[in-house]
Image (cartoon, helix red, strand yellow):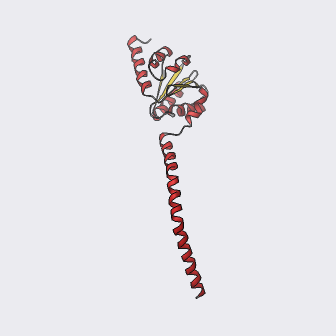
């Protein structure tokens, strides 16, 4: 049994994490073993995801003045909360990958930037590119027109060089 001080500490900790999180996921973990939950926590830690099992009443209190208050109605049953701290799709990737091998993990709610998404949006969120991937795609898109312009400007000079070389080869062959 938790004391009032312990409950207040849990609520404060989850509230601080939720205020700084990019996204949040609530998933039912009924039937998952301790070893499996330990693996989930380990994978989450590596991905920069905060994972915590919290009583639903405490979770509702913690989420009250955050962008994830929209999840409150979905907090029913034994749930584990996952908050992405670094990038929005990190928690979704961790949950998706864990659910592939553990069918007992059932996503109940997903929130991204204060908007409640359906549990079916897990795959869409998990396949979002990372920040680095998005930046590299953006740079490739920005670089393509410049490269094409450079090739276009260089083409007449290349053609002239090829023409002069062909004339030279023709004269050498005739001589």
Which residue is more in the foreground, 150 or 47?
150
Q: Residue furthest bottom?
A: 175
Q: Position of residue 28 (x, y in %)?
A: 56, 22
Vertical comparison of 8 with 91: above or below: above
Q: Position of residue 62 (x, y in %)?
A: 44, 18
Residue 124 is at least partly visible in this image: yes
Would you identify the image quadrant in which residue 16 lies?
top left
Q: Which residue does the image show at 47% across and 43% down from the upper left?
A: 132
Side of 99 where 114 appears, left or right: left
Which residue is more in the foreground, 147 or 50?
147
Q: Which residue does the image show at 40% across and 21% down from the upper left?
A: 13
Q: Which residue does the image show at 58% across and 34% down from the upper left?
A: 124
Q: Position of residue 17 (x, y in %)?
A: 42, 25
Vertical comparison of 152 with 49: above or below: below
For the N terminus, the quadrant is top left
Vertical comparison of 16 with 8: above or below: below
Which residue is more in the foreground, 26 or 117?
117
For the C terminus, the quadrant is bottom right
Q: Which residue does the image show at 45% across and 22% down from the upper left?
A: 66
Q: How many marks?
A: 0
Q: Position of residue 108 (x, y in %)?
A: 58, 23
Residue 101 is at least partly visible in this image: no
């Amino acid at each position: 049994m938790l004391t009032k001080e312990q409950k207040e500490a849990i609520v404060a900790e989850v509230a601080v994490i939720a205020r700084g999180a990019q996204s949040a996921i609530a998933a039912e973990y009924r039937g998952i073993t301790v070893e499996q939950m330990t693996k989930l926590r380990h994978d989450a830690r590596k991905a920069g995801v905060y994972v915590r099992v919290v009583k639903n009443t405490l979770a509702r209190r913690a989420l009250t003045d955050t962008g994830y208050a929209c999840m409150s109605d979905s907090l029913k049953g034994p749930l584990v909360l996952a908050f992405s701290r670094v990038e929005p799709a990190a928690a979704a990737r961790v949950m998706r990958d864990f659910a592939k091998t553990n069918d007992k993990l059932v996503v109940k709610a997903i929130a991204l930037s204060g908007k409640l998404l359906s549990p079916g949006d897990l795959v869409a969120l998990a396949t979002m590119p990372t920040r680095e991937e998005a930046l590299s795609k953006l740079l490739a898109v920005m670089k393509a027109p410049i490269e094409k312009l450079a090739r276009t400007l260089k083409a007449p000079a290349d053609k002239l060089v090829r023409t002069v070389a062909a004339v030279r080869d023709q004269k050498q062959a005739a001589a």
